[in-house]
Image (cartoon, rainbow, N blue to C red):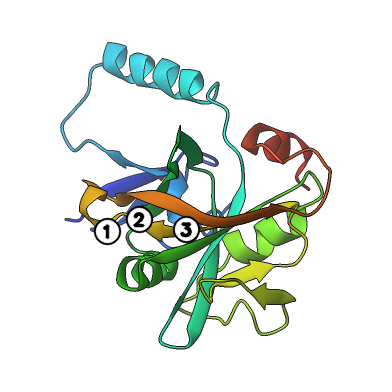
Amino acid sequence: MGKKWKCTVCGYIHTGETPPDICPVCKRGPEVFVLIEEEVQTETEQVDKKKVQEALFGISYGLFVVGSKLEGKINAQICNTVFQVTSDPTQVIMGINKKNLTHEYISKSGFVTIGILGQDGHDLVKHFGFQTGHEVDKFADMKYSAGKTGGPLVEGCIAYLEGKVVADKTIDAGTHSVFLIEIIAGEAVKKAEPMTYAYYRQTRK
């Protein structure tokens, strides 16, 4: 019997060795799934986990279009875990699910592009977050330009960053890899409020 994974957004339960690419109910990606422990839990333990999850929703996240190029092909996904850790050199941390095609591109190419979404970026969240690059070409009808790293800079973002993976600092976090990225280029192209995950949840249709 496979492992059981629960969608933290809608409660859907998936059985398998890894979480699904897309939740069939709420259409969210694998990053919202958590592994349900196989052992029987007491009622107290279950209540505590619920409290922890509610507390985690208090952490502020942004929403970003993260992309990369590998062997002439490009792909991108939505990521909510990007944050600056140092200013000299300028470095950010990024968490990416290992099942995602973008993870493969970043790991093998060593480069990444980051598009910071504004509060009008709902359509981009849907396009890059609710389908997988393993099955569709997300850039077939998408406007973008190539950055200095060759990776895609998706039109509609309010700012862009490009970076190089510090390979020996990558952390294996189970379902995800945590990448340390040294920023090598960046530009703010529009003065607007960035979209937070909380804002997206409150305003999505």
Foreground disc of the pair 2, 3: 3
Amino acid type, label 2: Pro
Amino acid type, label 3: Gly
In the displayed orientation, state which residue is furthest to the bottom. Answer: 72
Up-down: is 11 above or below 144?
A: above
Query: Which circle marks residue 16 in the picture?
Result: 1
Foreground disc of the pair 1, 3: 3
Q: Give the residue at mark 3.
A: 163
Question: Which picture quadrant has residue 99?
Answer: bottom left
Amino acid type, label 1: Gly
Give me the C-alpha separation between circle 1 and circle 3: 34 Å
Classed neighbour count for the residue bearing mark 3: other residues with Cα under 10 Å, few (<14), some (14–19), many (≥20): many
Give me the C-alpha separation between circle 2 and circle 1: 7 Å
Precedes in sequence: disc 1 or disc 3: 1
Position in image of residue 88 (x %, y %):
44, 37
Residue at position x 73%, y 82% in the image: 141
Classed neighbour count for the residue bearing mark 2: other residues with Cα under 10 Å, few (<14), some (14–19), many (≥20): many
Precedes in sequence: disc 2 or disc 3: 2
Residue 13 shows in the view = no
Residues marked 2 and 1 touching at CB (< 8 Å): yes
Give me the C-alpha separation between circle 2 and circle 3: 28 Å
Q: What element carries label 3?
A: strand
Residue 74 shows in the view = yes
Horizontal side of 193 relative to 68 (left or right) equals: right
Towards the viewer: 185 or 50: 185
Horizontal side of 84 relative to 14 (left or right) equals: right
Question: Which picture quadrant has residue 51?
Answer: top left
Query: Which circle marks residue 19 in the picture?
Result: 2
